Amino acid sequence: MRLIHLGNVVVDLVLTVGDLPVRGGDVIASSTTVTPGGGFNVMAAASRLGLTTLYAGPLGTGPFGDKARAALTAAGIEWLLPARAELDTGFVVTLVDSSGERTFVTSRGAEATLSSADLRRPDPDDVVYLSGYSLLHDSNRAALVPWLETIPADVQVFFDPGPLVADIPSTALEAVLARASWISCNAAEAEALTGLTDPATAAAAAGAAAVAAAALAARAGRGGVIPGNASIAPDPAPGVLVRIGSGGCLLAVRGEVVAVEGFAVDAVDLNGAGDAHAGAFLAGIAEGKEPVEAARWANAAAALAVTRRGPATGPSRSELEGFLREH
């Protein structure tokens, strides 16, 4: 199994502050780091745990693009597309306050220029990672939504709606939900996706929304139809992960919601915790773990990640297994 990542690799400009400035104000950062982030965080977390990982999105050629490619190479992650000669990779200004919470401002670059010509057919055993951020970019959305209808039904699709899920055009969101095998979000994102404040109820509702979207797609003649082959409908009941911080996560599979306990740690930086969780969950699923066991693995990876500063702080296999033995 390979992870084919179609999210956005960007560069994070991370500034640690005491408190966020008031509107029109200013604060002095106590530290500043420049590091690859966005989709890189998920891929790094999965790769460190042994999952073969490929980046299938665009990269730029300026200083940020150079930094992103160097980081991918160092992490053992292959990128599939030539760099965009006319563009640099985009960046995200991340403000980390005294509580460890993060606030973001994003500037788009080459990662927002995906086209249908860039997309390749995955192997049946692959898992494709899609981010809600990609669906906010007109070019990426126009390429990805029709492509999803053509990939083999055996290919798992892992969808991270992201914090701006409410801004994704409804037709695109429904198309991705209809094809999703896994949906992963935090409690706030689950509420934005479903309109429900209770995380457990939202987890169940997200799966039901995907079932409804798949039914609509089937009636419209879409969803799992492979050109030249028989019509194969994807599983209409995706698993749903809703992260609830130190409490762990809620896992909804086939309508049943299970609470998977988290780990209490002294958090210093919450940036990248969800990405570490996603990467570790996928690595666990790839090696045959049951969803509950993979979710516990993911909870442990996220707990370790928040004890370190920086966005790409997912643990190695030895670190993760040692942590679980101690807990």
Image (tube, helix red, strand yellow):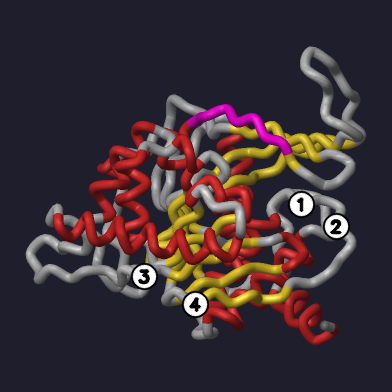
Q: What element carries label 3?
A: loop
Q: In which quadrant is the N terminus drawn?
A: bottom left
Q: Distance between the residues labelled 1 and 2?
A: 7 Å
| Label ID, residue 205 | none
> Around disc 1, counting alpha carbons within 10 Å, would you say few (fewer than 14), some (14 to 19), or many (20 or more)?
many
Q: Distance between the residues labelled 1 and 4?
A: 29 Å
Q: What element carries label 1?
A: loop
Upstream in sequence: badge 2 or badge 3? 3
The residue that mark 1 highlights is 270
Q: What's under tag 1, amino acid-wise?
A: Leu
The residue segment tinted magenta is: 103-109
| Figure label count | 4
Image side of residue 71 versus residue 216, left or right: right
Q: What's under tag 3, amino acid-wise?
A: Ala
Image side of residue 237 versus residue 293, left or right: left
Front label number (3 vs 1): 3
User: Residue 7: x and y, percent?
Assistant: 47, 48
Q: Distance between the residues labelled 4 and 3?
A: 11 Å
